[in-house]
Amino acid sequence: MNLKQGKNGHTYRVLKIDIELALERRLEALGLTEGSFITVLNNDKRGALTVKFRGTRFALGKRIANQIFIDEVYTV
């Protein structure tokens, strides 16, 4: 599933980032890499969503969020 399909308050592991190289490098510089954890803070389903990774909050546009593939992390 992609990040845009993520639910508020859920934490996910990034499986793949499939976007143009320059933007992928920028996300890597911010700390968003394959294998990192990301929490969806606000996903209103219409446009941008707010996420948290590496202790910092970010807003990501719909186009970018659609290209970040994730898997839900289940806690016990």
Image (cartoon, helix red, strand yellow):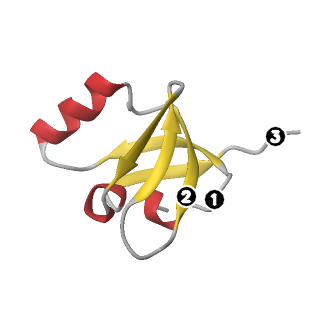
Are the residues tagged 1 and 2 within 8 Å (C-beta)? yes
- Mark 2 residue element: strand
Q: Is residue 50 above or below residue 48?
A: above
Q: Which residue is mark 1?
A: 8
Residue depicted at 47% across the width and 51% down the height: 50
Q: Is residue 2 above or below residue 34?
A: below
Q: CA distance from mark 1 to mark 2?
A: 5 Å
The amino acid sitting under disc 3 is Thr
Counting residues from the N terminus, which is met first, the one under dot 2 or under dot 3?
2
The amino acid sitting under disc 1 is Asn
- Residue 23 in view of the camera: yes
For residue 61, which numbered disc appears in the image? none
Q: Which residue is mark 2?
A: 42
Q: Which residue is mark 3?
A: 75
User: Would you identify the image quadrant in which residue 8 lies?
Assistant: bottom right
Few, some or many C-alpha atoms within 10 Å of disc 1 (few <14, some 14-19, many ≥20)? some
Residue 72 as seen in the image, left or right of residue 13: right
| Tally of marks | 3
